[in-house]
Amino acid sequence: MSAECWDPGPEGPQGWSLGSGGHSGASGSSQCPPLTMPAPWSLPRWRAYLAAAVLCYINLLNYMNWFIIAGVLLDVQNFFQISDSSAGLLQTVFISCLLLSAPVFGYLGDRHSRKATLSFGILLWSGAGLSSSFISPQYSWLFFLFRGAVGTGTASYSTIAPTVLGDLFVRDQRTRVLAIFYIFIPVGSGLGYVLGSAVTELTGNWHWALRILPCLEAVALILLIALVPDPPRGAAEKQGEVAVRDLRSSWCADIRYLGRNWSFVLSTLGVTAMAFVTGALGFWAPTFLFEARVVHGLQLPCLRQPCNNKDSLIFGALTVVTGIIGVVLGAEASRRYKKVNPRAEPLICASSLLAAAPCLYLALILAPTTFLASYVFLALGELLLSCNWAVVADILLSVVVPRCRGTAEALQITVGHILGDAGSPYLTGLISSALRARRPDSYLQRFLSLQQSFLCCTFVIALGGGCFLLAALHLEGDQDQARQPDTGIPDSKEVDSKDMERLSLLSGTQASTEDP
């Protein structure tokens, strides 16, 4: 029986090769036939940081697309004459198309050019977004269809871009870069509200908000093609120096591996809870705050376009500020706490979610009585939720082998959206519409219906915190497995001459044991 063997070669660590045969020895031995050693892939540091800056810029535009409609939701409802439940379905269509597309893009990202796949996604979502701004009121179904196409395009970026960064940076450097990258989730989301609301107020027509973004996305596409490389998978861990072959596996084998990775499974369930809450909150919060202002007598009801919802601007600015602070705090706390506790990442995620649950509950309950206190607790809840974005990405990259990180990102996105924000905006709107149907037709009852439909989010986010606590129990074992030579990539600091000698002897022992 043939077995893999490690050959240190005449050049020490740089000369390792993977072959088949018996005992380790010279690369020219008959038992270990030589393989061509690829030159180690490298990129100047300034090029890597420039590529990261471009990817961050595109991530900003990506999440602006997610929430630009929420910033003008009342105008969209009036234009197409749709109810709360139908408006919630608009976001559900967007997310559903995203999650159906994510596994496809994950498969392509693990096996084909990631740069070409990202370019296709940008072209798709920018073209669909621009086209949706020219739809007349009688074709509301077509508007839903184009929003689905935007979701399909954004799936490519959300799935593949983090894996590119994972192959450009490693360890603390990767944690910092991912923190900056994920800052643009809340920043882009907030600017989506701001852009939609501000452009509508300036032009008197919400359609123009959808016509400005494609211009920025055209610039993003040019920058992606010109400045972003497509590094070999696992390049940051110097895979070529440790395990020369880029081991391939089938998609089904990757799914089985991820299903047995408890850190990945439990953190994905935690991310799903986060997605459920942020999806409902991000889509309905501006409308909820607008109606709270109407109840307090601070705002006239929206009877015609434009609705002039100032709360979209305020909530957008709040999302940007709390997002930046939260992501930086979460990433820095993770980086420092890992030095004393290797389970720091899931513990930070769990504590922030468990603390966010009462903050969101108080923000909802206090809205009818004290508007300012509601805003304060809403800001605290958003801050705590934002602490997790970079940390959960770092968990995934540390417990999953490089060869199937794209599939892991896709699977996490799919599960997170199909059980999270794909249904939460629609469910919130559906519950609100059902409660309103049984109550007198008044602005107070409309507000209370939406408020009570939000309450389930507080329980879901607490469940997410519990999932991260369980993930902490499995983290170290899954990280060790991901670093094993046969399944993952060992840390470069651990690969010294003694380690190479030990692995070479082990491979020779295995071969002698298995061969007849």
Image: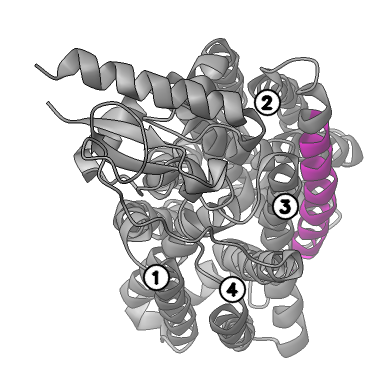
Q: Which residue is mark 4?
A: 228
- Secondary structure, mark 1, is helix
Q: Disc 2 marks which amino acid? A: Glu
Q: Disc 4 marks which amino acid? A: Val
Q: Disc 3 marks which amino acid? A: Val
Quadrant of the rendering where the N terminus is positioned: top left
Where residue 404 sits in the image (x, y, percent)? 38, 44
Question: Is residue 146 or residue 23 the one in the foreground?
Answer: 23
Q: Which residue is mark 2?
A: 345
Tell whether 147 sits left or right of 445: left
Disc on the earlier residue, 4 or 3: 3
Q: Is residue 440 visible?
A: no
Residue at 70 percent across and 58 percent down: it is 184
Q: Which residue is mark 1?
A: 117
Q: Which residue is mark 3?
A: 177
Disc on the earlier residue, 3 or 2: 3
Distance between the alpha carbons at the discs numbered 3 and 2 = 16 Å
Tell whether 52 sits left or right of 513: right
Q: Main secondary structure of the magenta part?
A: helix
Q: Nearer the viewer, mark 4 or mark 1?
A: 4
Residue 140 circle label? none
Distance between the alpha carbons at the discs numbered 1 and 2 = 31 Å
Magenta segment: 307-333
Where residue 140 sits in the image (x, y, percent)? 37, 74
The image quarter containing residue 397 is: top right
Residue at 45 percent across and 45 percent down: it is 409
Distance between the alpha carbons at the discs numbered 4 and 1 = 13 Å
Q: Tell me, yes or no, whether the highlighted magenta stretch contains residue 329.
A: yes
